[in-house]
Image: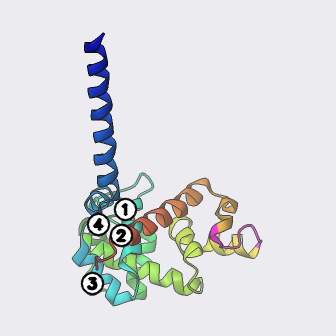
Amino acid sequence: MRKGHAKRRRRLVLLLFLVVVGLLFYQSEWLGRTIYPIYYKDEIQRSADRYQIDPKLIAAVIRVESNYKAGAVSPKGALGIMQVMPETARWILEKEDFGAITIEDIGRNPEAGIRVGTWYIQELLRQFDGNLNLSLAAYNAGPGKVKTWVAEQVWDGSEKRIADIPYGETRHYVKKVLYYYNKYQEVHKDSF
């Protein structure tokens, strides 16, 4: 009988120890940065500075789009770390002087992909008067679709009405980017 009691007591102490250690790690910056890492910080910072966009927003878009995989290509053909569609990339390269950057560079080179994707975020924020929710939806579904939703009063662009976004993929996308953006702001306070 005593052996069983001692064994249960050891298990309880071990469980309590694991809970305490878990709570310490849960609250630690180290654990947060491990769970929510940001890669390509220098490249993100350069583009953030150039286009006056919060680097944590850029990191959140990258996390959702490619999870930092530089050479990613989506089933729909979106290219690179920020998953820019080829037609959009062509339009961006015509609109702005990116020097020698090509569509192939956007797909392979993280710095080129980040620069072009960040420019596009800036452009969408301009088109949607700084409304982040509308801009993120447009990054995913295209600005024409989002303008139609607003014009037809399908969605007002507010965060509280994200459920009104008619495309499930876009609705999920906006929620995920906002989630990671908030996490990066919380966990990476001193970064950038």
Q: Residue 63 carries which label?
A: 1
Displayed quadrant of residue 100: bottom left
Q: Are discs 1 and 2 less than 8 Å apart at CB?
A: yes
Residue drawn where x is 34% and y is 51% of the image: 23
Q: Which of marks 3 and 2 is nearer the N terminus?
A: 3
Residue type pointed to by label 3: Arg
Q: Distance between the residues labelled 1 and 3?
A: 18 Å
Q: Distance between the residues labelled 3 and 2?
A: 12 Å
Query: Would you place residue 161 above or below residue 122 in this image?
Result: above
60 in the magenta segment? no
Image position, residue 142 (x, y; %):
56, 70
Q: Mark 2 points at which residue?
A: 59
Left or right? Give the position of 177 relative to 14: right
Image position, residue 103 (x, y; %):
32, 72
Residue type pointed to by label 4: Ile
Any part of residue 31 in sight: yes
Q: Distance between the residues labelled 3 and 4?
A: 14 Å
Residue type pointed to by label 1: Arg
- Image quarter of the N terminus: top left
Residue drawn where x is 70% and y is 69% of the image: 149
Describe the element under mark 2 as helix, strand or loop.
Answer: helix
Q: Earlier in the sequence, mark 1 or mark 4?
A: 4
Residue drawn where x is 39% and y is 64% of the image: 83
Tell which of 10 and 149 is nearer to you: 10
Q: Which mark is residue 38?
A: 4
Q: How far apart are marks 2 and 4 (CA)?
A: 6 Å
Magenta span of residues: 152-159
Q: Are discs 2 and 4 less than 8 Å apart at CB?
A: yes
Residue type pointed to by label 2: Ala
Describe the element under mark 4 as helix, strand or loop.
Answer: loop
